[in-house]
C-alpha cells in the first residue's frame, strides 16, 4: 500500500508486557494488539477478520500473532471486499459472536458504507433492541504519515452523523488499550478510529497491568467520557485522535508565552461529553477546536455549535476552529500545509479577543 | 479455514444437485451448472413429470404445502385490500409467487434461519411469525414488528442484497460453533446486479458455509426487465463463477421448489456448502400499490402467466389423485379466510404509537443527548396536552 507497512512491533500477541509492576515502554500499536489478544483470550466469541489480518498480522501489524495464538477460525483473512466483511460481521453478531473487523485504511472502508449506515447503525433500533450488534469496526485513520491518496482520510463525520454508532478515537497508548477493550465489550456497534500517525507513539505503560486493571473492572469508563489532557486557565483547546498531540504541543508553546491553555482530549466523539467540554470552556471563557478533517460540516463544527449553545454567556470570544482545509487530502509533499499545526493553533489562540 | 475450504471444494463438486452421490471431487466443473431447463415436477396442466434427480414430495407434504399456498394467496389479496383502504402505507405483493414463498419457509427446520426481502411477507408468515407483527413494518408504526430470534427470521430487508451477507455471517457463526443450522437467503432478480450479491456468494463459497441463496426471478425490478439486468445464460449460471452449484426451478411449481430447495438445504446441512437456486416466476401485480405496471408491460404479457399459476396446477394434480376433496378445499379456504379476518381485524384496530420509544433503542443505554431530546419531546407533548404555549425565557444565563 504505502511505505507505512513497516511493522511497528515484532512480538507475538500473548507477550503483553513484562514483569508485573515494572514500567515498560509500549507503542500505541502494541497496546491495540494486546487489547485484541486479551479480549480474545477473555471471550471465545470475539473474532478478528479483514484483509491481511491473518498470518501477515495486518498492514500495520495490529493483529500480529493473533492467528498463531488463537487459530485461523478466530483471526482470519477474508476475500478483498469491505461490504462483504461488514455484512458478514453483522450476521455473526446477530448469531452470538463479537466480531472485530479491520478496514485496512479509512478510505477503503467506503464500500462498506451501506452496510454500516443501513444495518449496523439501524438494526438494533429496527428490532427494538431485540437484535444487538456487538461489533467493532477498526479503521486505521487520518493522515500525517506521508500516505498516498485514499490512505489518509479523516472520515469521522460520516460515522458520527449516523445515529446508532459509537465513534471513538484514542490519542494515547493507555487509552488505545482500554478503549479498544471497552469497544469490544460494548453491546453496541463501535467505529474505532486508530490515528495512523500515532501507531508508533510510545508511553511508559505495563500492558499486563492494564489488562489486570481492565479485567478487575477498575478502568474508568471511557466511552462518552472526555478527559482534560492538560489543565489550564486561559483558553481551552478541544481535540481528539491525531490532533491531540498537536494541541498539547501548542499548549506547551503557549505556556512559554505566558498563556495557560487547557487541552481536552474527547476520546469519544459519539457519545459526546458535553459536560467535560462545557465545564472547561465556562472556566476559561475561550475555546479553539482542533481537528484534522475538513472543517465544513464537520465534527469540529458540531463542537463549536454545542459550545456556543451551552456556554454563550461564559464566552469572551467566538469559538474558533483549526481544521483541515476543505480540499481532498493532499499528497505527501503537501500534507504539512494542510494539517493543523502548532503555529496555526497559536494563531487561533491569539485571535481569541484577549484585548477585551 | 484454508483446510476447510479445500475439503469443502471436493464436497461442493461432488454434492452438486444432479450430481448424485459424492465422488471425491472427480465430478467435472460442469456439474456446477444448472440444468438446461428449469426443474419441473408438476406442469401447468397438473401433470407430474418424472425427474430422476428430484423425487416428487409425498402426497401429505404436497397437501400441507397446498394449504399454505391457499393461505398465502389470501394474505396477499387481503394486504392489497388494506392498502386500498388506507390501513397500510404500501404492500409489495408476492401474488403469483406464492409457491416460492411457501417453499422457502417449509424446507427449513426450527434450527434454521430465513432471510427475507420486503416482498417475502408470505414466506415470513408461513415460517410462523404472527401476521400482525410482520405487517407492522408496512402499517407504519415501527420499522420492524417481530423478534428475529423467536422464529429465526431476519427483518425484511429493504436495501437490495445486503441481507445475503448477514445470512452468510449467521451461517458462519453457526458453523464455527459446530451447529447444524442452515440459512436460506432470499432476493430477487434485480438484486443479483448488486455488489453485495456477488460478495455474499463469494464469501459463502470461500468459507464453505451452509447457505442456500434463493433468487425469485419474477422478471422485473420495479419496471426494469431481466434482460436489462443481466445477459448471463441464466441467473443460476452465476453460481459456477463462485465454485458453487446453481440450479433452476419452475418457480410456480411448488413440488419442484420443495424438491430443489430441500435438496440444497440437505446438502448445506451435510457440509456440502452453499447453493444458488433460481426460481422462474412472474410478478403478477405492480411492484407495489404505488407503481403503475402498465407503463412498462402489457396486459398480454401478464395474461400469459395466468395459466401457469402455482395454485391451479397443484390443485389439479391433488384433485386427480383424490388427495384434495371438496370438503378439504372448503376447510382450507375457511382457514385462509380466518387468517385474513385476523389481519383485517388487527389492522383496523388503531395502534397507539409511543413517541418516547423513538429514543429507546438507538443505543443500549441512552446517550446524554438522547435523554435531552427525549425530554424535549416529552415536554412539547405535555404542553400540547395541557394546551399551554411555548415557554419564553429571558434569562441571560447559560443552560446547564
Image (tube, helix red, strand yellow):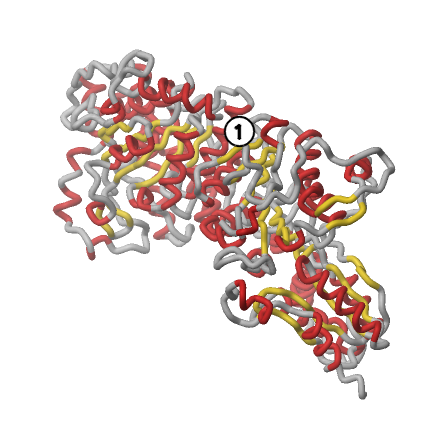
Q: Which corner quadrant of the image does residue B334 belong to?
A: top left
Point out the image quarter for the C terminus of chain A.
bottom right
Would residue A103 be found to the left or right of residue B19 on screen?
A: right
Residue B216 location (% of width, % of height): 29, 37
Determine which quarter of the picture holds residue A124. top right
**Residue in front for this viewpoint, B169 or A192:** A192
Q: Residues within 10 Å of mark 1 (few under 14, many from 20)?
A: many
Q: Looking at the image, which is closer to me, B123 or A24?
A: A24
Residue at the spot 80% in from the left edge and 84% down from the top edge:
A354
Identified at 66% across, 52% down, the residue is: A168
Residue A1 in the image, given as x and y percentages of width and height: 49, 49
Q: Please, which chain is the residue tagged with disc 1 on? A: B
Residue A210, image quadrant? top right
**Residue B374 seen by the camera:** no
Q: Residue at x 36, y 18 (%)?
A: B11
Above or below residue A67? Residue B47 is above
Residue at 34% x, 47% y is: B81
Q: Is residue B357 above or below residue B316?
A: below
Image position of B208 with respect to A233: above or below? above
Residue placed under numbered mark 1 in the picture? B173
Counting from the top left corner in percent of width and height, residue B347 is at 46, 45
| Image-based side of A262 in relation to A82, left or right | right
Where is residue A65 drawn, in percent x and y?
62, 32
Given residues B391 and B364, the one toward you in this image is B364
Relative placement, left or right, of A255 versus B303 is right
Farthest residue, direction bottom:
A355
Asked whether the viewer can see residue A329, the reply is yes
Callout 1: SS: helix
Amino acid at each position: 500500500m504505502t511505505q507505512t507497512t513497516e511493522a511497528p512491533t515484532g512480538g507475538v500477541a500473548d507477550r503483553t508486557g513484562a514483569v508485573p509492576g515494572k514500567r515498560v515502554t509500549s507503542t500505541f500499536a502494541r497496546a491495540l494488539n494486546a487489547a485484541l489478544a486479551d479480549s480474545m483470550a477473555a471471550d471465545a466469541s470475539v473474532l478478528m477478520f479483514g484483509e491481511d489480518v491473518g498470518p501477515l498480522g495486518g498492514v500495520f501489524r495490529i493483529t500480529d500473532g493473533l492467528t498463531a495464538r488463537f487459530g485461523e477460525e478466530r483471526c482470519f483473512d477474508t476475500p478483498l471486499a469491505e461490504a462483504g466483511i461488514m455484512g458478514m460481521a453483522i450476521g455473526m453478531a446477530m448469531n452470538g459472536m463479537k466480531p472485530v473487523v479491520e478496514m485496512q485504511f479509512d478510505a477503503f472502508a467506503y464500500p462498506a458504507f451501506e452496510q454500516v449506515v443501513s444495518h449496523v447503525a439501524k438494526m438494533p433500533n429496527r428490532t427494538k433492541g431485540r437484535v444487538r450488534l456487538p461489533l467493532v469496526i477498526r479503521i486505521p485513520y487520518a493522515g500525517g504519515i506521508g500516505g498516498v491518496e485514499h490512505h489518509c482520510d479523516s472520515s469521522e463525520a460520516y460515522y458520527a452523523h449516523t445515529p446508532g454508532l459509537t465513534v471513538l478515537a484514542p490519542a494515547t497508548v493507555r487509552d488505545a488499550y482500554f478503549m479498544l477493550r471497552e469497544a469490544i465489550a460494548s453491546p453496541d456497534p463501535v467505529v474505532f478510529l486508530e490515528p495512523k500517525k500515532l501507531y508508533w507513539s510510545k508511553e511508559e505503560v505495563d500492558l499486563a497491568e492494564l489488562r489486570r486493571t481492565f479485567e478487575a473492572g477498575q478502568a474508568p469508563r471511557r466511552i462518552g467520557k472526555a478527559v482534560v489532557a492538560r489543565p489550564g486557565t486561559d483558553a481551552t483547546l478541544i481535540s481528539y485522535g491525531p490532533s491531540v498531540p498537536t494541541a498539547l504541543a501548542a499548549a506547551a508553546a503557549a505556556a512559554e508565552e505566558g498563556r495557560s491553555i487547557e487541552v481536552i482530549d474527547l476520546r469519544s466523539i459519539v457519545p459526546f461529553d458535553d459536560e467535560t467540554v462545557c465545564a472547561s470552556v465556562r472556566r476559561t471563557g475561550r475555546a479553539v477546536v482542533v481537528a484534522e478533517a475538513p472543517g465544513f460540516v464537520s465534527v469540529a463544527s458540531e463542537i463549536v455549535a454545542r459550545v456556543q449553545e451551552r456556554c454563550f454567556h461564559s464566552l469572551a470570544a467566538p469559538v474558533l476552529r483549526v481544521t483541515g482545509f476543505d480540499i481532498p487530502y493532499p499528497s505527501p509533499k503537501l500534507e504539512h500545509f494542510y494539517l493543523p499545526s502548532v503555529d496555526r493553533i497559536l494563531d487561533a489562540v491569539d485571535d481569541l479577543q484577549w484585548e477585551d | 479455514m484454508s483446510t476447510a475450504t479445500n475439503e469443502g471444494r471436493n464436497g461442493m463438486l461432488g454434492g452438486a444437485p444432479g450430481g448424485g452421490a459424492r465422488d471425491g471431487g472427480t465430478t467435472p466443473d460442469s456439474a456446477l451448472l444448472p440444468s438446461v431447463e428449469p426443474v419441473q415436477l408438476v406442469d401447468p396442466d397438473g401433470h407430474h413429470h418424472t425427474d430422476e434427480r428430484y423425487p416428487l414430495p409425498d402426497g401429505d407434504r404436497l397437501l400441507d404445502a397446498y394449504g399454505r399456498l391457499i393461505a398465502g394467496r389470501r394474505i396477499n389479496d387481503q394486504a392489497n385490500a388494506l392498502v386500498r383502504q388506507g390501513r397500510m402505507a404500501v404492500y409489495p405483493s408476492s401474488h403469483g409467487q406464492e409457491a416460492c414463498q411457501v417453499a422457502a419457509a417449509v424446507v427449513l427446520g426450527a434450527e434454521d434461519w430465513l432471510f427475507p426481502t420486503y416482498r417475502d411477507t408470505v414466506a415470513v408468515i408461513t415460517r410462523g411469525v404472527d401476521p400482525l407483527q410482520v405487517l407492522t413494518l408496512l402499517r407504519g408504526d415501527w420499522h420492524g414488528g417481530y423478534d428475529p430470534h423467536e422464529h429465526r427470521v431476519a427483518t425484511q430487508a429493504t436495501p437490495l442484497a445486503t441481507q445475503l451477507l448477514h445470512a452468510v455471517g449467521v451461517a458462519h457463526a453457526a458453523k464455527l460453533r459446530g451447529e447444524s443450522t442452515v440459512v436460506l437467503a432470499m432476493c430477487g432478480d434485480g438484486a443479483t446486479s448488486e455488489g453485495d450479491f456477488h460478495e455474499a456468494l463469494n464469501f459463502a463459497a470461500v468459507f464453505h458455509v451452509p447457505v442456500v441463496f434463493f433468487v425469485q426471478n419474477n422478471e422485473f425490478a420495479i419496471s426494469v426487465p431481466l434482460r436489462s439486468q443481466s445477459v448471463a445464460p441464466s441467473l443460476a449460471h452465476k453460481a459456477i463463477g463462485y465454485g458453487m452449484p446453481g440450479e433452476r426451478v419452475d418457480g410456480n411449481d411448488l413440488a419442484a421448489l420443495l424438491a430443489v430447495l430441500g435438496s440444497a438445504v440437505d446438502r448445506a446441512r451435510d457440509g456440502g456448502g452453499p447453493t444458488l437456486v433460481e426460481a422462474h416466476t412472474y410478478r403478477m401485480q405492480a411492484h407495489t400499490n404505488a407503481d403503475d405496471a402498465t407503463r412498462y408491460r402489457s396486459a398480454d404479457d401478464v395474461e400469459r402467466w395466468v395459466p401457469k399459476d402455482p395454485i391451479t396446477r397443484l390443485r389439479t394434480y391433488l384433485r386427480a389423485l383424490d388427495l384434495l376433496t371438496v370438503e378439504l378445499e372448503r376447510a382450507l379456504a375457511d382457514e385462509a379466510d380466518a387468517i385474513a379476518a385476523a389481519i383485517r381485524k388487527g389492522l383496523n384496530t388503531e395502534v397507539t404509537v409511543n413517541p418516547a420509544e423513538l429514543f429507546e433503542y438507538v443505543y443500549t443505554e441512552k446517550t446524554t443527548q438522547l435523554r435531552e431530546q427525549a425530554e424535549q419531546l416529552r415536554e412539547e407533548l405535555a404542553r400540547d396536552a395541557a394546551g399551554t404555549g411555548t415557554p419564553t425565557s429571558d434569562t441571560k444565563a447559560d443552560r446547564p
